[in-house]
Image: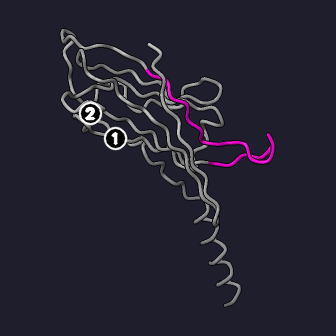
Amino acid sequence: MTKYYIFFTLILLITSCTQKKELSSINPENWTKRAINISTKDSLEYGKSYLSIYSQIYSLSEHKKHNLTAMVSLRNTSDKDSIYILSAKYYDTHGKTIRTYFDYPIYLAPMETTEIIIDEIDITGGTGSNFLFEWKLPKHSSEPLFEGIMTSTMGQQGLSFTTQAKRIE
């Protein structure tokens, strides 16, 4: 009887370790509810922004890395106008596309914020991951703000820092 109990416990442990954990912001349903059709005839200004993100950082040496959770904050800084984010593309350290969160226009209402979360277990970006955002907004409206907030906690130790996007086009 004891052998069966040990065997059952061992099988339970093995199968529980192989369950695949779902990553946060990958579900396209998060973005389709924000989709909007904008006319190509609208007099909207186009822009592109680059944001550095760190899903890992070096710790002690180049041979030891520490995983981080990254929150990418997409903010409409206008208190009057909606803005439109056309695409959000995530790249790894080597410049290869990891995933496109959406490649159709979504809207952000005045002063609205939405986020993309890169889970701590998602280390595909590496130490030099980044985002490219394409966006449009009404003339004379303030530009969107894209920020990265990286965090991690282990025991009583905590680590956090931020990055801000740079307009490149």
Q: Disc 2 residue type?
A: Leu
Q: Earlier in the sequence, mark 2 or mark 1?
A: 2
Magenta-span inclusion, residue 61: yes
Q: Residue visible at 42% across and 32% down?
A: 146
Q: Secondary structure at mark 2?
A: strand
Of the pair 167 and 89, the residue shown nearer to us: 167
Of the pair 82 and 97, the residue shown nearer to us: 82
Q: CA distance from mark 2 to mark 1?
A: 8 Å
Corner quadrant of residue 124: top right
Q: Are marks 2 and 1 in contact (CB under 8 Å)?
A: yes
Residue tagged 2: 108
- In the image, residue 134 above or below residue 58: above
Residue 43 coordinates in the image, percent (x, y): 21, 10
Q: Residue visible at 24% across and 39% down?
A: 33
Residue 66 coordinates in the image, percent (x, y): 68, 49
Residues drawn in magenta: 49-67
Residue tagged 1: 114
Q: Residue visible at 54% across and 54% down?
A: 20
Q: Secondary structure at mark 1?
A: strand
